[in-house]
Image (spheres, helix red, strand yellow):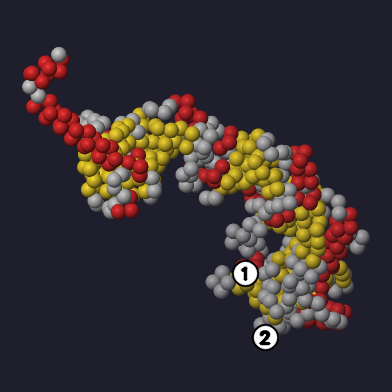
Amino acid sequence: MKFEDIEIEDVDFEAMLEESFKKSDSKSDLVEGTIVRISEEDGQAIVDIGRKNEAFMPIEQIKDADGNLLFKEGDTIEVVVTGRGERPTVSYEMAKKRSALNDFIKEYDEDQEYIIDGLITKKNKGGFVVECDGLEFFMPRTLSYLNTKNDVVGKKVKAVIVKVDKDKNSVVVSRKELIERDKQKIQEVVDKLLESKEVVEGTIKKITSYGMFVDVGGIDGLVHYSQISHKGPVNPSKYFEEGETVNVIALDYDKKKKHLSLSIKDANPDPWQNIDKIIGVGDTVTATISNIEPYGVFVDLGEDLEAFLHVSEVSWDKNVKHPKDYLTVGQEINVEVIEIDKEARRLRVSYKTLLPKPMDEFSSSYKVGDVIKGHVSSVTDFGAFVKIGSVEGLLHNQEISWDKSKNAKDMLKAGDEVTVKIIKIDKDAGKISLSKKILEESPVKQFAATHKIGDIVSGTVKDQKDFGVFISLDDNVDALIRTEDLHPLKAEEIEKGQEIRAVISFIDTNNDRIRVSVKRLEKQEERDALNKLNLAQDDSMTLGDVLAGKL
């Protein structure tokens, strides 16, 4: 019931009613008349009402729905005099209503209550004329509870008959009476609901974006969307339908706004009160996906519980762009409970922990040393990630090319297909190391094919460390001179770009390492000089010297 159009005034009801009756008596006389003439051309009928002048009446009033005349010239009918003057006017329609009203009044039972659903057809200073089933009733303004500032003609109203005057053939109805009854009924129902705080059954009348209107005991109350579930605010249309029966409990009543607040969640047990008995960390439960957002998924666990599945827990794939690429609303999935926060009333679950780990699948299919193909998923400053099935391996800059001046950004881009060799699998850390350069012959192996330990080589100083000096022997071939092998050179006097001669002292083609020694060069040069001297001395001896020595 709406009360915003109610207007209450202190008016002398009896005086106003009498005035209305007086006006009615003086204007509308019910008389018997004889149809003298019917003119289709003029659209008028002339009726003799026993007065000085005959009266006029529109012939449409004496036609049926199909346009056929109900009377003929000479017929006697009852009419109401509606206009006086030189040529009075009469109405057959008003006479029918008056006659019907008279019949109603004669049969009226004072011990019975009559409630009407009518339409306001006229308005005057005293009140309104309400028509119902062809009968016209009078509703005083003070009994209307209507705001007279608004145009109420044409408005449908419900009212109760409060007075019947058989002498004046008048029936008075009141809308106020019914409204006051409804107000009293509402207050009684509200008081009972609020005092008992009992759970009652209600019927959903209407669902909106902000909640649901539920009928309880004949009055409507609002269940706000925050009062529907212990999960928190929810969209009611996803869980309920109009006409459905629900259990509710009354929260509050705003007398000024006539607003009853109801709650569904308070009418049902709070699962968080006994959450430890319902669910625990590590449990696997079946959930229904209720909502999907870019940052994660909300799942319904039943028991009026909702959990959050973060996007990082959807798949082992680290490049999940949106959960909707993996899951759909309404889908049932098994999830593992990974966090229960009682204070925040928050549940977190994981979907991927119940799926096979890609690392386990990879390690069961591949081993270190296998050569495989993959696609570059991303390129970074330190290397490139290569997608192999559902896992990614790191192709470090050091493993891309034997040319140390090149890196991943120089040689690769996302989407490129590459052939690589697995050089390390760390299941615990979930890491795979790959190499591209290992599939090509290393410069050290090429160098070793033409050089051996003891060969004298020259190189340019490339870098200097605490433990020694690196020199460049050839393209992409570096050698280390350890500090103790620099003699007679002094480390502090060596400059970058300086050329140094040394002897190859160590070659490791498996680990691409070469060491050279300046110190050994000095000894080797001394030994070579001595060998040359000894050889020269041997060449100058005669046969006699040799035989003499023998003898």
Secondary structure type for disc 2: loop
Give whichever of 492, 418 is nearer the camera.
492
Which of the 4 image quarters holds residue 126? bottom right
- Numbered circles on residues, count: 2
Labelled disc at residue 477: none
Q: Quadrant of the C terminus?
A: top left
Secondary structure type for disc 1: helix
Question: Residue 428 vs residue 17: left or right?
Answer: left
Question: Residue 256 vs residue 399: left or right?
Answer: right
| Whether residue 413 can be seen here | no
Q: Residue furthest top?
A: 551
Q: Amino acid at mark 1?
A: Ile
Question: Residue 257 vs residue 445: left or right?
Answer: right
The percent position of residue 231, horizontal first and vertical second, equals 69, 49
Q: Amino acid at mark 2?
A: Glu
Residue that appears at 89% across and 58% down: 195
The percent position of residue 286, horizontal first and vertical second, equals 64, 35
Do the residues under discs 1 and 2 have CB atoms within 8 angstroms? Answer: no
**In the displayed structure, would residue 29 be above or below residue 109?**
below
Give whichever of 463, 62 is nearer the camera.
463
Which of the 4 image quarters holds residue 305? top right
Residue carrying label 2: 86
Residue carrying label 1: 59
| Label 2 packing within 10 angstroms: few (<14), some (14-19), many (20+) | few
Give whichever of 44, 141 is nearer the camera.
141
Residue that appears at 51% across and 30% down: 360
The percent position of residue 158, horizontal first and vertical second, equals 77, 64
Query: Mark 1 or mark 2, which has the lower sequence index?
Result: 1
**In the displayed structure, would residue 355 be above or below residue 261?**
above
Residue that appears at 24% across and 35% down: 524
The percent position of residue 505, horizontal first and vertical second, equals 29, 34
